[in-house]
Image (cartoon, rainbow, N blue to C red):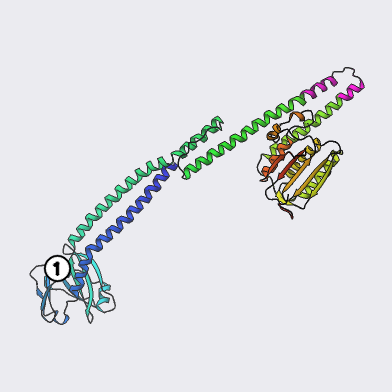
């Protein structure tokens, strides 16, 4: 069963329930309005019964279906159909009404009222070809009177009203079903467009398709969310394509050079020992470059996957380990560290890689014996070198993948180190920025969102 059909059924059911409840309420309200005056008249008539004169004063009325009671001290004649009931079930019915009322059985409730053990009550009955309504009330010791009145006209009116209410309810349900179908169809049109777009994306793999959004209801929000998801997937796919293209481009040069050197070594030609050592050294260096490049590509790919496991980490301890490793790999650089105790919630391996890339970059650009200043406060790590600095035109691009400034193309590296740093910072809700101090060199600021420490906030 489709969603549209289910919505139409639910709408029709809700309207049907409302119509039925309203019809039932109208029926009982009309019935109450019809019978309230009748019930009031029955009660008033019952109060006029004068028991001591009941039997002697019974006389026929002017109408064959009426009886009168000599009631009250003034002998008022009240025309009413009635009968007297005792607590044993005996009935005293006027002879003119014996054929009509004498055949009616006496209920247990009527006996209780006669015995003064029950409350007055109303009941409807059919007798003598007529619809009658009766009121039963105690009028003396072990005696109750049952006053009757014809309600054929009222019942006929109620029957017509009932019929009309049933017809109105059926028509209302039919109209509600039709309206529910068309309303559901119109309401679900954006959902249908969304489904069709999703199917086109699945079959064509075209992530540039979008759904037109109008309004601000839940369906419009769903369409907007779907468009945002498509945009995110399109951007991720574009980044993936760009990464593959850039990686293939960067790998082509070392692979070509490596293949050439290996072919020369494998040609069998007699090479001078120095040239052979030189070629072997190039092969080893190229393999090292490729290993580093593949490792950085792997790091980038892992960074784009779902969020890694995070934990509480000590940023100052990570920075100390990275500084020791950098000093070992770059013995010509002097590192001055000012590390305050700092902690954060993050991925230790990712943060260590980002710190290492920042320090390796600073060490690579520092002159022999030049200092590299490292400072950690709260969630911010600053790394300052005193090298030649970065050209103004290169500043907007230094964190892009595979971007290498003109002055850096003769130096080892893949152009991925700072891209990884930015990725790690953004994954931790932070930022990385680059500055050009007035006295030269380069200053990198790596800041994550939830870093904390005794000196947090002091730069």
Residue 85 at x, y percent in the picture: 21, 76
Residue 84 at x, y percent in the picture: 18, 75
Picture quarter with the N terminus: top left
Residue at the disc numbered 1 = 99
Residue displayed at 13% across by 70% down: 97
Which of the pair 434/313 is nearer the observer? 434
Residue 341 at x, y percent in the picture: 77, 53
Residue displayed at 53% across by 39% down: 226
Residue 401 at least partly seen: no
263 falls in the magenta region: yes
Residue displayed at 71% across by 27% down: 248
- Residue 100 lies in quadrant: bottom left
Q: Say whether residue 6 is left or right of residue 407.
A: left
- Residue 280 lies in quadrant: top right
Q: Say whether residue 330 is left or right of residue 99.
A: right
Which of the pair 396/228 is nearer the observer? 396
Q: Secondary structure at mark 1?
A: helix
Q: Say whether residue 227 is left or right of residue 296.
A: left
Q: How many marks?
A: 1
Is residue 157 shown above or below 361? below
Specify start and end residues of the magenta stretch as a single range.
Answer: 256-278
Residue 3 at x, y percent in the picture: 44, 43
Is residue 40 shown above or below 263? below
Residue 202 at least partly seen: yes
Residue farthest toward the left in the current orientation of the protein: 62
């Amino acid at each position: 069963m489709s969603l549209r059909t289910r919505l139409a059924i639910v709408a029709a059911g809700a309207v049907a329930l409302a119509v039925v409840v309203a019809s039932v309420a109208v029926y009982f309200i009309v019935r109450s309005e019809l019978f309230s005056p009748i019930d009031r008249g029955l009660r008033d008539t019952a109060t006029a019964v004068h028991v001591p004169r009941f039997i002697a004063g019974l006389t026929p009325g002017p109408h064959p279906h009426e009886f009168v009671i000599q009631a009250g001290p003034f002998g008022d004649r009240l025309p009413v159909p009635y009968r007297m009931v005792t607590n044993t079930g005996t009935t005293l019915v006027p002879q003119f009404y014996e054929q009509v009322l004498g055949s009616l059985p006496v209920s247990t409730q009527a006996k209780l009222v006669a015995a003064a053990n029950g409350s007055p009550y109303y009941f409807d009955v059919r007798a003598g070809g007529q619809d009658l309504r009766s009121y039963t009330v105690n009028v003396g010791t072990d005696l109750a009177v049952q006053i009757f009145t014809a309600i054929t006209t009222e019942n006929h009116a109620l029957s017509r009203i009932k019929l009309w209410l049933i017809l109105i309810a059926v028509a209302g349900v039919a109209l509600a079903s039709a309206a529910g179908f068309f309303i559901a169809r119109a309401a679900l049109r954006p959902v249908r467009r969304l489904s069709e777009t999703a199917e086109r994306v699945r079959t064509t793999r075209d992530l540039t398709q979008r759904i037109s959004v109008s309004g601000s209801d839940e369906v419009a929000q769903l369409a907007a969310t779907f468009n945002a998801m498509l945009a995110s997937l399109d951007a991720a796919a574009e980044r993936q394509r760009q990464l593959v293209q850039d990686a293939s481009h960067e790998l082509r040069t070392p692979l070509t050079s490596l293949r050439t050197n290996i072919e020369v070594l494998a040609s069998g030609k007699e090479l001078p020992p120095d040239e052979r050592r030189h070629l072997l050294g190039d092969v080893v260096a190229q393999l090292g470059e490729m290993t580093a490049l593949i490792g950085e590509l792997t790091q980038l790919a892992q960074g784009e996957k779902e969020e890694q496991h995070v934990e509480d980490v000590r940023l100052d301890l990570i920075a100390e380990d990275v500084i020791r490793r950098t000093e070992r790999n770059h013995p010509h650089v002097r590192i001055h560290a000012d590390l305050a105790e700092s902690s954060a919630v993050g991925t230790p391996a990712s943060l260590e890689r980002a710190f290492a890339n920042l320090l390796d970059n600073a060490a690579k650009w520092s002159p022999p014996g030049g200092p590299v200043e490292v400072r950690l406060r709260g969630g911010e790590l600053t790394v300052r070198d005193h090298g030649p600095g970065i050209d103004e035109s290169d500043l907007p691009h230094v964190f892009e993948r595979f971007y290498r400034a003109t002055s850096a193309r003769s130096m080892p590296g893949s152009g991925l180190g700072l891209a990884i740093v930015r990725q790690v910072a953004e994954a931790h809700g932070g930022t990385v920025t680059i500055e050009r101090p007035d006295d030269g060199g380069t200053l990198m600021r790596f800041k994550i969102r939830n870093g904390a420490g005794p000196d947090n906030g002091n730069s």
